[in-house]
Image: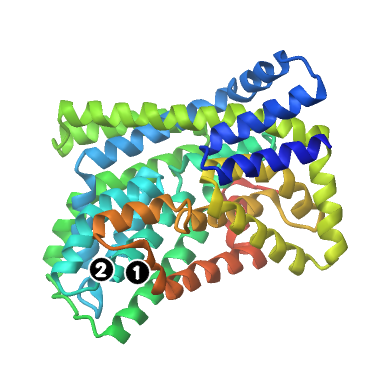
């Protein structure tokens, strides 16, 4: 009965439009009160959930991303992408994909990515004759690649939701190949739609133009290299890498590019504080939720239920993907990771999937949810910038959805995409 109260109250609050963090917290409180447990359990679980040293990486990565967003780095990355690939048919769309990938690498946030790239690329594409729905779909889907990049704080959240048994360094290395796969799939989709609609090709600026654009953009992109090199070589941990990213970004935007102002710095700091507060609140209330799920053996129950459907790993992985996709349409990315990981990770591992590979599956699935109504944050931002309705964008979304699902299937069923780099550079033996 208590498990029914937990699940029904949680989904009931979501249907009523209650924010996810409060829906999780209130459903947990209702269940604890029904069980007659001491109310001190609520605060004990929340504090134990948030009081983890590794979580320091989250505010640092978020702050670094906001500094990149408000520090003028996006314009330089856009010019580099245009110079390198903008001359092919539908070149602005393909340049958009490359720019979103590169900026996602330095900011690690899909929402920040679509905000920065969308503000620059969507109006530019519309001016050059591209349809608004195409411009928005390209931008919002390419922005999701940022969830797999080294600066993504969602990797930290997944590592801790997995019980701290997954190496953050291995996750950071594992995300690179899936990110490349996702970018290639998006490039193919953007090109095919551009050819079908007859979009124009741009003008190649010459190798001199490419070199000038590269020289301007490379200092910003170096943050990815610094984080990877530092973690893989053992010079610093993921938490220390996040703090290094903040220091580097401040020096870059204030003294190298000289594009950061005090006003923008304060905006970045305020946004980082707000985002960190939301994430930590989610982590705290999710700790209560996870405690109750463990108490009622939800993971074992779900494992038996899925196992009764099929004993084939291929079918089980597909079922997990479908369930995660449905959850992602109703919940934010961090909430989905925190709630779903303790349930589905043991099931996936039972059928032979490595936890690092499952992390990539989880991140892509949750990113897909960011672009799917009714809680499609990335899509809503893109539509607002493009001045187009969500319904209009959804009518032409299938080629881009197809690209995302193709990348998801490759990561799900080909472990090498996720595990090659961790094994090569870190000796990962999972």
Q: Position of residue 66 (x, y in %)?
A: 31, 37
First in sequence, mark 2 or 1: give its number: 2
Q: Using residue 204 as the reference point, say whether residue 321 is left or right of it.
A: right
Q: Using residue 314 as the reference point, say whether residue 382 is left or right of it.
A: left
- The N terminus sits in image quarter: top right
Distance in Å between CA atoms under marks 2 and 1: 9 Å
Q: Which residue is mark 1?
A: 392
Q: Which residue is mark 2?
A: 132
Q: Position of residue 406 (x, y in %)?
A: 54, 71
Q: Are marks 2 and 1 in contact (CB under 8 Å)?
A: yes
Q: Is residue 128 positioned above or below 373 on the image? A: below
In the image, 303 versus 82, the foreground residue is 303
Q: Nearer the viewer, mark 2 or mark 1?
A: 1
| Residue that appears at 16% across and 26% down | 262
Q: Position of residue 182 (x, y in %)?
A: 47, 64
| Residue that appears at 51% across and 42% down | 17
Q: Using residue 428 as the reference point, say whether residue 368 is left or right of it.
A: left
Which of the 4 quarters of the picture holds residue 130? Answer: bottom left
Is residue 240 something one can see in this rendering? no
Is residue 51 something one can see in this rendering? yes
Check disc 2 and report its element: helix, strand or loop. Answer: helix
| Residue that appears at 34% across and 39% down | 65
Q: Position of residue 136 (x, y in %)?
A: 31, 63
Which of the 4 quarters of the picture holds residue 41? Answer: top right
| Residue that appears at 55% across and 50% down | 330
């Amino acid at each position: 009965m208590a498990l029914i109260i937990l699940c029904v109250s949680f989904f009931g609050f979501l249907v009523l439009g209650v924010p996810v963090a409060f829906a999780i917290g209130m459903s947990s409180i209702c269940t604890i009160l029904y069980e007659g447990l001491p109310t001190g359990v609520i605060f004990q679980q929340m504090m134990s959930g948030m009081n983890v040293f590794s979580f320091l990486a989250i505010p640092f990565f978020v702050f670094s991303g906001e500094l990149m967003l408000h520090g003028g780095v996006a314009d330089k990355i856009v010019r580099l992408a245009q110079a390198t690939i903008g001359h092919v048919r539908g070149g602005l769309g393909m340049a958009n994909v490359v720019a979103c990938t590169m900026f996602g690498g330095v900011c690690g946030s899909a929402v920040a990515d679509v905000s920065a790239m969308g503000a620059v690329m969507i109006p530019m594409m519309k001016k050059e004759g591209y349809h608004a729905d195409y411009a928005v779909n390209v931008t919002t889907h390419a922005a999701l690649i940022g969830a797999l990049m080294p600066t993504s704080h969602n990797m930290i959240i997944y590592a801790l939701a997995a019980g701290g048994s997954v190496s953050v360094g291995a996750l950071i290395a594992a995300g690179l190949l899936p990110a490349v796969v996702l970018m290639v799939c998006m490039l193919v989709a953007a090109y095919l739609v551009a050819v079908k609609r007859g979009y124009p090709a741009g003008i190649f600026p010459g190798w001199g133009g490419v070199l000038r654009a590269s020289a301007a953009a490379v200092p910003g992109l170096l943050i990815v290299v610094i984080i990877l090199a530092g973690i893989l070589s053992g010079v610093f941990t993921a938490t220390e890498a996040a703090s290094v990213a903040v220091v580097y970004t401040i020096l870059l935007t204030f003294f190298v590019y000289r594009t950061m102002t005090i006003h923008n710095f304060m905006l970045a700091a305020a946004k980082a504080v707000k985002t960190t507060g939301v994430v930590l609140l989610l982590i705290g209330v999710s700790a209560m939720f996870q405690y109750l799920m463990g108490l009622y053996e939800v993971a074992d129950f779900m494992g038996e239920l899925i196992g009764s459907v099929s004993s084939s790993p291929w079918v089980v992985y597909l079922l997990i993907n479908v369930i995660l996709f449905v959850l992602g349409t109703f919940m934010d990315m961090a909430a989905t990771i925190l709630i779903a990981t303790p349930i589905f990770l043991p099931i996936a591992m039972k059928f032979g999937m490595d936890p690092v590979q499952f992390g990539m599956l989880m991140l892509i699935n949750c990113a897909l949810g960011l672009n799917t109504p009714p809680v499609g944050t990335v899509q809503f931002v893109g539509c607002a910038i493009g001045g187009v309705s969500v319904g209009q964008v959804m009518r032409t979304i299938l080629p881009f959805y197809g690209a995302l699902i193709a990348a998801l299937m490759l990561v799900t069923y080909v472990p090498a995409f996720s595990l090659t780099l961790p094994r090569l550079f870190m000796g990962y033996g999972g």
